[in-house]
Image (cartoon, rainbow, N blue to C red):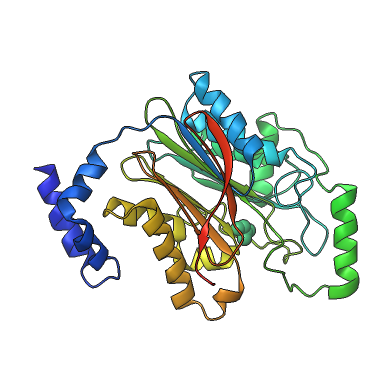
Amino acid sequence: MKKINRKKFLLSALTGTAALPLLFKKGLAQNVMTLSSAGSGPLVIATWDNRKATDAAMQQIMNGKSALDAVEAGARVPEGDPEDTSVGYGGYPDRDGNVTLDACIMDHQGNAGSVTFMQHIRHPVSVARLVMEKTPHVMLSGEGALRFALENGFKKENLLTEKAKRAWQEWMKENKYTPKVSKNNHDTIGILAIDKKGNISGACTTSGRAFKMHGRVGDSPIIGAGMYVDNEAGGACATGLGEHVLKTLGSFLIVELMRYGLTPQEACKEAIRRILDKIPGAHNDQVGYLAINKNGEHGAYSIKPTFPYALYQNGENKVMESDFAMR
Ligand code: GLY
């Protein structure tokens, strides 16, 4: 009965969209089967060559912890790494020299937490998790997020390393405070995991676009933009120019397309196509998406080369290169 209702819903919801021919090509019956036949081993996937993060996440899963514990542990790796200039401690500051951080997390029950524009806290993903678990809210921002973190035992730190400060000072000489941003100056980590129970969770964390305007918030902490999970359909996350992801709500789009039967790869490709179709000039920029479904299949697609990603599955932690649109 549930399958018939879903089929009707899919048909009515998708009529007129670009995805419809694909659905017919694949066959709806097969799609409904796919959605209801969860059964993958553990998996962790992360944007860029974040193999240390996928390793930390998989250790959690192997120790019997949840996908939620896994993605938090994974995201904390680049957050704590001063050499990673796009995430957490050591992240490049905004044009005023402030390191401002965005992060979100989502579990298999649809619970979500997020912090935006937060300063002085090394691990925003863990604050986002506490927002999810300890407050009636989804998102805390700026001073409020900082206060909440301090009240919950997080330490206030200077996150601007000497390396990041020098880069900012160099940027100031040339750009004279103009928020002109290179397309390749950040590499947010988005991370998705499936645990031993087959549950999916995801997280995303970043210091955002280097030398951005003070107060700028990107896609990473926005549920459905930088990351989205629906335990029934799959999970998706994004990296790259957050403004493009925000305008198309890419991670939510990908998960919905998977719900309607697209493979993770097809769904990622469609979300990139949406950006290229709707946003003039986007072909010059970079956005990369990752997605997983309940069967442990994954997809990766970007606007242009190169977009490597880390995949830990079947006992192997490897870096792979995504397919891309602009050739
Ligand atoms: N994708 C990260 C950002 O644009 O902030």
- Give the percent coordinates (x, y) of residue 87: 70, 48
Q: Is residue 121 visible?
A: yes
| Residue 123 figure quarter | top right
Taking the spot 54% from the left edge, 32% from the top edge, the residue there is 316
Please tell me which residue lies in front, 145 or 311. 311
Taking the spot 33% from the left edge, 55% from the top edge, the residue there is 256
* Residue furthest to the top: 63
Quadrant in which ligand 1 is drawn: bottom right
Residue 167, above or below 46: below
| Residue 216 figure quarter | bottom right
- Give the percent coordinates (x, y) of residue 69: 53, 29
Q: Is residue 106 visible?
A: no
Please tell me which residue lies in front, 159 or 28. 28
- Give the percent coordinates (x, y) of residue 252: 41, 55
Relative placement, left or right, of 22 versus 44 is left
Relative placement, left or right, of 82 versus 52 is right
Taking the spot 44% from the left edge, 30% from the top edge, the residue there is 42
Residue 97, above or below 75: below
**Total numbered badges shown on the rendered structure:** 0
Relative placement, left or right, of 44 versus 16 is right
- Give the percent coordinates (x, y) of residue 67: 47, 31
Instruction: Say which quadrant the C terminus sits in.
Output: bottom right
Instruction: Say which quadrant the N terminus sits in.
Output: top left
Relative placement, left or right, of 121 versus 283 is right
